[in-house]
Image (cartoon, grey):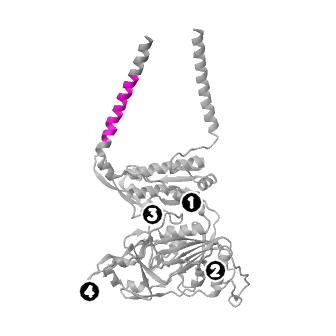
Amino acid sequence: MKQGLSNRKRSILKFLILIVSIFVINFVSSFFYFRLDLTEDKRYTIKPFTQQLLRNTNDLIYIRIYLDGELPTAFVRMKRALYETLSEFKVIAGKKLQFEFVNPYSTKGTKNQEELLKKLSDIGLQPTNVHIKDKDGAILQRIIFPGCLITYRGKELAVNLLRNNPNLSGEENINLSIQNFEFALIDAILRLTNETKQRVAFIQGHGEFDEFETGDIEGELNQYYRVERITINGDVNALKPYKTIVIAGPSKPIPEADKLVIDQFIMNGGRALFFVDPVSVNIDSLSTGANTLAFVNQHNIDDMLFRYGVRLNPLLVQDLQCAVIPVNTAFAGQEAHFVPARWLYYPLLNPPSGNPITKGLNLILSRFISSVDTVGLDFNVKKEILLFTSQEGKMVKVPALISLSQVSRSIMRYEFNRPYVPVAVLLSGNFTSNFRNRPVHHIISSGKINILEKSPYTRIIVVGDADIIRNDVQRRPNGAYILPLGYDRFTQQTFGNKELVVNMVHYLCDNVNLLQLRSKDIKLRLLNRKKVVAEQLTWQVINTVLPSLVLVIGGGIWFVIRRRKYTHRL
């Protein structure tokens, strides 16, 4: 009896010690942040840059997500993944971050719903059509807004979270969207909270695109940087205040004095982004139905780029993976009838996924693009291809006569035997000056310049097509109307040009931490449909019979063991 009471007291004491230990551990752990991500692809791991930004936020960030209510299965998965990401954000930011999911169709009254949907579209959220089942099983078409509205200190910013790459399936686009959640949200928060901006200059004065033709990308970059347009005019100090310069579409020879200023800007550690057309084509002549001549563009920077490690080839690239253009098929005197036709001179470029600049981007629309080669044996300069054509490309020598009548010609597939032609190159390292061992006193007329022959570590990007950064402009009596960069008016599709240029500038301005948020790669584990159909019966039998069989065998073994045990005691 005494031994039984003693054992009972010990058990009660152990139980009390366990309860007290659990409370103590929970109390102590509440003062420490510790989370363990055991997933293979680290889908719940938040990058250090994100953690730092969220912790250093000075005011409340409020996020309203318009992705709630009756949704297709894929968007339910998207909503759940977004909730998990925002929950991780909230753990880091604490009370400084609040979020809620809103069903735009929960508003009472059809008129109020229509007003809300129109408001969401007006503020920049892109709608998408989906099909859902109602309670009676009927299929309904509904417009949803897979995006959110972020508010900070009275400022609002719309963020579209759905990626829409036409080359990918719906599941792959949803998965790509989930991978991009952290980048999209932190990118928007950074734009709202950023108070100090680096300076970026668009060079003008040599026939570059005007403020309307680069208006969309300049407006986008203004959210991150202080963007200005600058004319050099041989001024040695013209580029000193800037971190990065953009040379977009020069159509006139750049004078040696301006080249020297640009060269020395790079030699002092400045970053440069070149969008250059090696071949000049008059697109306006084509739009009127006439022929046009493609000839070499005399921009006068070939020698400088060659010294840095890049050669722009005066050749045009045709590609079977290309955009379409509207072609009038009506006879003369009849009403115009436009149909889409493949235009081989407008290649659609596949951005590689191995670089943070191009990872996860939609196709890139190019027009009359030329190839770019890497040259030189300078081991201090690293060269990396950023963009290339598809595996079915063709080179066209210039001068060449180009006509819209070419869309009706038969395509000889065997002629397209130039795969993966490089059209954009990233250079990084220590560059040698183009003016090394050259007299320059006669070049610069104003100011003194100390020639640096070698640069510190810096970066240059060269693209063999200026139209990648140019947006379309509609000239109207009341002014110029700027269309979004990468937007195709005929197919009403938006390509990835804007994101590409923004990422390039981010990379050149050392905002690598932001681009590294794109490195998250969540594997899409889909069932093999062919294998599912072929082995359906086998797996049905295994899933229904095997568990019952295991229970029966296990129960039998347990019964035999207990019978032997207690029979022996008796």
Residue bearing mark 3: 122
Q: Quadrant of residue 368?
A: bottom left
Q: Residue 534: percent from the left, percent from the top? A: 29, 49
Element assignment for label 3: helix
Q: Upstream in the sequence, badge 3 or badge 2? A: 3
CA–CA distance in space, label 3 to label 2: 41 Å
Q: Image point 46% across, 53% down: which residue?
A: 523
- Whichever of callouts 2 and 4 sits on the residue coming sooner in the sequence is 2
- Taking the image as shown, residue 422 lies to the left or right of residue 170, namely right
Mark 2 and 4 residues: CB-CB less than 8 Å, in contact?
no
Q: Amino acid at mark 4?
A: Gly
**Residue behind mark 1:** 516
Judge depth for marks 3 and 2 and give the one in front: 2
Q: Position of residue 42 (x, y in %)?
A: 52, 50
Name the residue located 54 percent from the left edge and 73 percent from the top edge.
425
Distance from label 3 to label 4 (Cα)? Answer: 41 Å
